[in-house]
Image (spheres, rainbow, N blue to C red):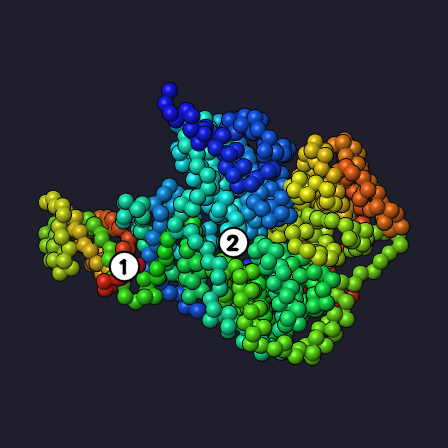
Amino acid sequence: MNQPASAYFIEERHDPNETHTLAVLVQNEPGVLARVIGLFSGRGYNIESLTVSETEAQKHLSRITIVTTGTPMVIAQIKHQLDRMIPVYQVVDMTETRRSIERELAMVKVRGQGEHRVESLRLADAFRARVIDATTESFVFEITGNTDKINQFIDLMRPLGLVEVSRTGVAAIGRGPEGM
Amino acid sequence: MSDKSHDPNQMTGAAMIVRALIDHGVTDIFGYPGGAVLPIYDEIFQQSEVQHILVRHEQGAGHAAEGYARSTGKPGVALVTSGPGATNMVTPLTDALMDSIPLVCISGQVPTHLIGNDAFQECDTVGITRPCTKHNWLVRDVNDLAKVLHEAFYVATTGRPGPVLVDVPKDVQFATGTYHPPRKSDVHRSYAPRVKGDAAQIRKAVALLAGAKRPVIYSGGGVINSGPEATKLLRELVEVTGFPITSTLMGLGAYPASGKNWLGMLGMHGTYEANMTMHDCDVMLCVGARFDDRITGRVDAFSPNSKKIHIDIDPSSINKNIRVDVPIIGDCANILGDILQVFKAEAKKPDIKTWWQQIAQWRARNSLYYKKSNDVILPQHAIQSLFEATRGKDTYITTEVGQHQMWAAQFFGFEEPHRWMTSGGLGTMGYGLPAAVGVQVAHPDSLVIDIAGDASVQMTMQEMSTAVQYELPIKIFILNNQYMGMVRQWQQLLHGNRLSHSYSEALPDFVKLAEAYGGVGIQVHKPSDLDGAIQEMISVKRPVLFDCRVAALENCFPMIPSGKAHNEMLLPEQANDEATAKAFAGGKALV
């Protein structure tokens, strides 16, 4: 009856899933991203968004920002598992600190004529999206904001002739004068 | 000619590898040559400080290095070629990762300009071994090699120990560069394992221990990995507190089996008293163990009424399977020392007389009981006889994986750490024979016995040849029941006794096989011949295959069926058909 599906199955918990944004400071060396991604796939964790770029070239430091979901116990595991990797300097849970700003950039291509075209431009203006490419029958908008804002903008563009979207994924930074 | 030609630190990559081994005190390595490591083998040929043991399969090199590491506390070193040499190392690397064994593997790689070209014997070694090492490196520049090698040894042996791999392309082995001896800056600044426990947490732990009515100490392989000081302190803590102690498979020997507070091993095939003590305790002190599923059984029924203290050097072990109340991150020896100091200064030995009375009742159930026979050798009896025959001798035991392994853990008493080498986490059949080779290399004059099963031992049997070549007098003590015993046991218990492919139809004649390898074969059928045969095995100073024919259908009890709680153990005398069917009902999907 109420048997767990496997002995490896962790206690059936009904803890709700949470979404957390983690900032991971790593040594920029070959394979470091593969290690991080391999950890997530190998242990069955979710990646909602992942961005990575070198942030301090002289020190060979890269910053990886990962948005992930899981129960509080899983989120704690993810942080510990990341932290024990050799090239990882620091893992900061931007969600837990509650003092962070998150931004994402998207480029949104919309194709249309007449009223649709005018409406897309009007909405872009309302969302403070910029036109970065235009033809007589299309626009490419650049929009920056948090994930919700971008999702909302894309939803609005859909009936107006949405062609494609390219998103950077989430970048996050703490508020105030201190670094991580 | 430049001045550099006189600089003794100018050398080839291959020479650096041998030099680094010497600088790290390595005296023995296990390996197998091939195209991509020929320059290293050429260097090995021209020196005498590092002895190379030629195995017969790279997996053997890995397990031998593991056995060497576990029995000495020093890192084990394996050297393999590219491609299949490296892929054959995947099992030992994973095994070492699961059991936290310090292992340094050096693999050859095709020349850098061929990497990615699907060259002969090329594989993405660092990609393949990334998830089965603590860390790995591909060295593309000979001037990075010294630093990487030194870091590899440091990472393998510090913090939670584990396997590392350094992949060295052939052109880097040939290239000349600058070597430097080990120095601090060789290590990633991001790697700094915590050693010292948090003082406030230690006080909390002591307060819990001092107030315990029904305490238990549950120790694991971390105590052994931490070194002799941790073992000493653990024993002292047991003495000072008077608490009962149990241990995981990996931790056997940290507390002596003859000690009066010893409950025996816990877990799926642990003793009744150990598991009941765990289930009913009010304070649990877990030292260097990780609440593995073989230990906990059903997690939501695991020791439901206890406060749990967990000492571990790896923060990711905390709250992974079981939520604990007082986690303490750091090295076992360090933290045990602090706990003892605070306990002695501030606490009294708690009065737990009634708890011990309760434990005595559980002990009286005699959960390791089995019925001896005059006609056929019972496997438990064989292990007991082996234990009696080796008592007082300088003995090291390795095992394969399965029933024989559990019987060895139950019936062979370990008095000291580093004497018991078994594949715990990964459960690697074929581990024991090559591990015994490694142990014997480290301890040439000791008695090294691989307690084996007839199925497991055939997985790495080729290493008999290694033992013969290097005159390593290992003893392979095969409990031969002609089955994959544990597979058969599960099929009996969970799959309607349909013994699908668990019977070994065509076993070799182990006596002839031993002789074919140049070793000694002994076979015994009758219980009355057993002791004499064991004496003969011990007295022979050559590798022995000991074919001990045992009762074919004996099962390993007691047992916590998967997904059941500690207090739902199946004891041997209860294991009739009906009780068994009931105990295992619905558990088929479990492992």
From the top left corner, tell me how far across and down residue B467 is, in percent. Answer: 70, 36
Around disc 2, counting alpha carbons within 10 Å, would you say few (fewer than 14), some (14 to 19), or many (20 or more)? many
Left of B121 or right of it: where is B262? Answer: right
Q: Amino acid at mark 1?
A: Gly
Quarter of the picture holding the N terminus of chain B: top left
Q: Nearer the viewer, residue B171 or B546?
A: B171
Q: Residue at point 60% right, 42% down?
A: B65
**Residue position marked by numbered label 1 in the rendering:** A179
Q: Residue at point 47% right, 69% down?
A: B199
Q: Nearer the viewer, residue B539 or B377?
A: B539
Q: Amino acid at mark 2?
A: Arg
Query: Residue B493 sits in which quadrant?
Result: bottom right
Query: Residue B240 sits in which quadrant?
Result: bottom right
Q: Residue at point 73% right, 49% down?
A: B395
Tell me the chain of label 1. Answer: A
Against B388, residue B560 (above or below) is below
Question: Do tags 2 and 1 sit on the same chain?
Answer: no
Around disc 1, counting alpha carbons within 10 Å, would you say few (fewer than 14), some (14 to 19), or many (20 or more)? few
Tell me the chain of label 2. Answer: B
Between the residue at mark 2 and the residue at mark 1, the CA separation in whole angstroms equals 30 Å
Against B282, residue B196 (above or below) is above
Q: Nearer the viewer, residue B28 or B535?
A: B28
Q: Is residue B562 visible?
A: no
SS for dot 2: loop
Q: Are marks 2 and 1 in contact (CB under 8 Å)?
A: no
From the top left corner, tell me how far across and down residue B378 is, in percent. Answer: 81, 54
From the top left corner, tell me how far across and down residue B505 is, in percent. Answer: 75, 41
Q: Which mark is residue B335?
A: none
Quarter of the picture holding the C terminus of chain B: bottom right
Q: Residue at point 23% right, 62% down?
A: A177
**Residue position marked by numbered label 2 in the rendering:** B160
From the top left corner, tell me how far across and down residue A91 is, in percent. Answer: 37, 57
